[in-house]
Image (cartoon, grey):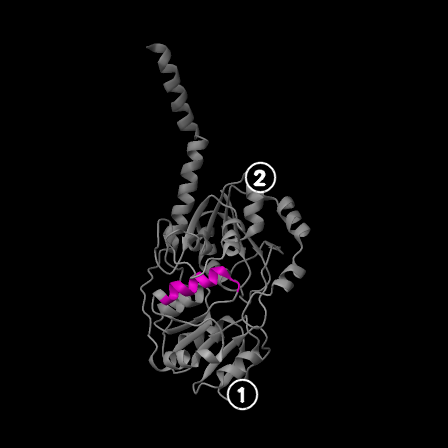
């Protein structure tokens, strides 16, 4: 069986999860990897066979989606051509982590496709939703990656086919400590915005930035370029994490019993929903880096809750069950030789009675 595993490359969460999932799929079947999008800083532990432009929503420098830049950088005709020309028919099954080229191509050519993503869980009726409804955001989550079969990951098991997060083995096996600093990952904010805001709070901040070229320190704020090893070390040894309301990083922070403060990106409906979910689990949430939130941040620094969740490692069983379920369905659609022979024998019997 040949499987295409397709990954949304915007941000780091999808590729981080793929570090665990791709080797497991490859353990059972012949796996090809496609990535679309261009805002990730993750170095992968697997080969990427296809790199596509896809359709990416770009962030700005002040904590929100940059709609003008997103529209300017989008190329709908190129996106359609990627869907139309991709050799999807060579695969028996597509597993997509909210990647649109593969999902739309599979839909167009009738190739079986399963979505295995966090977004598949966010749209579940029982999953926490943002306080204010966002019809455009809901529409995007429902139609950006069109699949009938969905397997979701979320902070809790809110419904059937929703699983708890995939925690990287590097995090599961790490010797977590508390050295007193706070790790920051807010890629939707520019470095200078972060520096001016964070220096007002008398703790040590370690900020990982896509804009930083080298390690620099001003006052109590240190900026680092993004790389897996440095980030994992800072993250595992911090007292708390200040980050966007994504999925993988908040989940890993809770798993390592860290204090967690999330800031959902403006205009990003999924993050608005995630923020509500993390708040329900004990995290602190603010809507922006604003002076109005000084008291909330100070309370978090002095009295914030050290979160604790026990996310069991069920990733391999999820992968194995997904592949087995597909094979079972295919056998029902296209019977094996033995099954077909048995069926023909049973058909002959009716003429004997």
For label 2, the crowd category at 10 Å Cα-Cα, with few meaning under 14, some 14 to 19 and many 20 or more, is few
Q: Position of residue 98 (x, y in %)?
A: 51, 53
Q: Are marks 1 and 2 in contact (CB under 8 Å)?
A: no
Count of labels in the image: 2
Residue at left 39%, top 83%? 180
Q: Position of residue 232 (x, y in %)?
A: 45, 72
Relative vertical location of residue 218 with respect to residue 341 in this rendering, above or below: below
Q: Is residue 238 visible?
A: no
Report how far apart the C-alphas of labels 1 and 2 lie in the structure: 55 Å
Looking at this view, is 146 or 294 the one in front? 294
Could you say which quadrant of the image residue 236 lies in? bottom left
Is 127 part of what is drawn in magenta? no
- Which one is earlier in the sequence, the residue at label 1 or at label 2? 2
For label 1, the crowd category at 10 Å Cα-Cα, with few meaning under 14, some 14 to 19 and many 20 or more, is few
Looking at this view, is 86 or 203 the one in front? 203
| Labelled disc at residue 105 | none
Relative side of 60 to 292, left or right: right
Q: Which residue is mark 1?
A: 218
Relative side of 352 to 221, left or right: left
Q: Secondary structure at mark 2?
A: helix
Q: Quadrant of the C terminus?
A: top left
Q: Secondary structure at mark 1?
A: strand
Residue that sits furthest to the bottom in the current view: 219
Q: Is residue 348 visible?
A: yes
Q: Which residue is mark 2?
A: 109
Could you say which quadrant of the image residue 328 lies in? top left
Q: Position of residue 285 (x, y in %)?
A: 41, 71
Q: Main secondary structure of the magenta part?
A: helix
Looking at this view, is 204 or 235 the one in front? 204
Magenta region, residue range = 267-279
Q: Position of residue 278 (x, y in %)?
A: 38, 66
């Amino acid at each position: 069986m040949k499987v295409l595993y397709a990954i949304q490359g915007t941000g780091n969460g999808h590729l981080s999860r793929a570090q665990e999932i791709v080797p497991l799929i490859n353990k059972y079947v012949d796996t090809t990897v496609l990535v679309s999008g261009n805002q990730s800083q993750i170095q992968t532990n697997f080969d990427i066979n296809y790199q596509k432009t896809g359709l990416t929503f770009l962030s700005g420098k002040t904590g929100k989606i940059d709609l003008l830049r997103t529209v300017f950088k989008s190329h709908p005709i190129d996106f359609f051509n990627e869907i139309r020309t991709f050799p999807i028919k060579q695969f028996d099954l597509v597993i997509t982590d909210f990647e649109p080229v593969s999902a739309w191509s599979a839909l167009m050519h009738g190739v079986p496709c399963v979505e295995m993503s966090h977004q598949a869980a966010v749209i579940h009726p029982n999953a926490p939703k943002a306080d204010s409804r966002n019809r455009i955001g809901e529409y995007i989550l429902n139609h950006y990656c069109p699949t009938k079969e969905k397997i979701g990951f979320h902070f809790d098991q809110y419904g059937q086919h929703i699983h708890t997060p995939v925690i990287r083995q590097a995090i599961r096996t790490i010797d977590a400590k508390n050295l007193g600093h706070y790790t920051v990952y807010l890629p939707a904010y520019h470095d200078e915005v972060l520096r001016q805001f964070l220096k007002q709070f008398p703790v040590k901040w370690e900020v990982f930035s896509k804009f930083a070229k080298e390690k620099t320190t001003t006052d109590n704020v240190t900026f680092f370029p993004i790389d897996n090893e440095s980030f994992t070390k800072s993250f595992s040894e911090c007292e708390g994490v200040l980050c966007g309301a994504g999925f993988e990083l908040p989940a890993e922070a809770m798993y390592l019993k860290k204090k967690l403060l999330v800031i959902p990106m403006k205009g990003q409906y999924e993050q608005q929903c995630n923020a509500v979910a993390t708040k329900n689990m004990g995290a602190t949430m603010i809507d922006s880096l604003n002076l109005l939130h000084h008291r909330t941040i100070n309370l978090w620094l002095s009295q914030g809750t050290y979160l604790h969740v026990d996310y069991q490692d069920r990733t391999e069983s999820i992968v194995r069950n997904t592949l087995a379920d597909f094979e079972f369905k295919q056998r029902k659609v296209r019977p094996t030789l033995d099954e077909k022979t048995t069926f023909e024998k049973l058909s002959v019997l009716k003429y004997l009675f």
